Amino acid sequence: MLDLTQKALQSRGFSCQRIDGQTSLQGRSNAMKAFDEDDECTVMLATIGSAGEGVDFTTAQYVHLLEPHWNPMAEAQAVDRVHRIGQTRPVTVIRYIVPSSIESQDKMRTINMSLDTISDADKAEEKRLERLKKYLQ
């Protein structure tokens, strides 16, 4: 998804930086520096995992979650990299969700059910598989 987004942004003249799981520590540092200091660089593309720790995006003002993560806490941690101490502007977070998709289901309820007991976890897994089969038909 980042590849497609990056290509679309660049084709429309946006300057952006990117960090993901394959970005080296030096590459992350360079991307963060460019995003913080280069006025032409208005977009940082980052995976949830790479944006969840060890980075500070307080120069950002908007967060667009293009691919919701299965773990809502990981999403929250990534958003917290923007909305944290040192942020001086309002932060807007936008989640892109496909209607009637798995992402639109109540993930927290499913996670909580699966953590209650092994029996409940088995039931939750069965329900999840039933939903997946329904969506794939």
Image (spheres, rainbow, N blue to C red):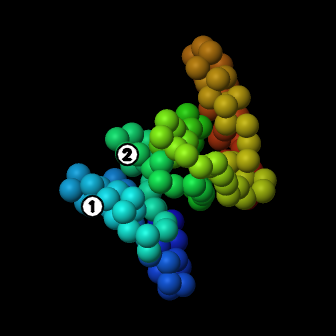
> Is 62 placed left or right of 20 in the picture?
right
Seen at 21% across and 56% down, the residue is: 26
Residue picked out by circle 2: 55
List x then y, in percent, for residue 103. 67, 48
Is there any visible trace of residue 109 in the rendered image? Answer: yes
Residue lying at the far right in this picture: please name it. Answer: 100
Q: Quadrant of residue 63?
A: bottom right
List x then y, in percent, for residue 115. 58, 20
> Is 57 placed left or right of 32 in the picture?
right
Element class at badge 2: loop
Element class at badge 1: helix
Neighbor class of circle 1 (other Cα within 10 Å; few <14, some 14-19, many 20+) is some
Neighbor class of circle 2 (other Cα within 10 Å; few <14, some 14-19, many 20+) is some
Q: Amino acid at mark 2?
A: Val
Dot label at residue 110: none
Seen at 55% across and 34% down, the residue is: 73
Q: Is residue 102 above or below residue 22?
A: above
List x then y, in percent, for residue 42. 49, 68
Q: Amino acid at mark 1?
A: Asn
Q: Quadrant of the C terminus?
A: bottom right
> Is 53 placed left or right of 27 in the picture?
right
Seen at 78% across and 53% down, the residue is: 100
> Is 38 placed left or right of 22 in the picture?
right
Dot label at residue 30: 1
Residue lying at the far front in this picture: please name it. Answer: 88
Q: In front: 101, or 37?
A: 37
Q: Is residue 58 above or below residue 111?
A: below
Residue lying at the far top in this picture: please name it. Answer: 117
Is there any visible trace of residue 78 in the rendered image? Answer: no
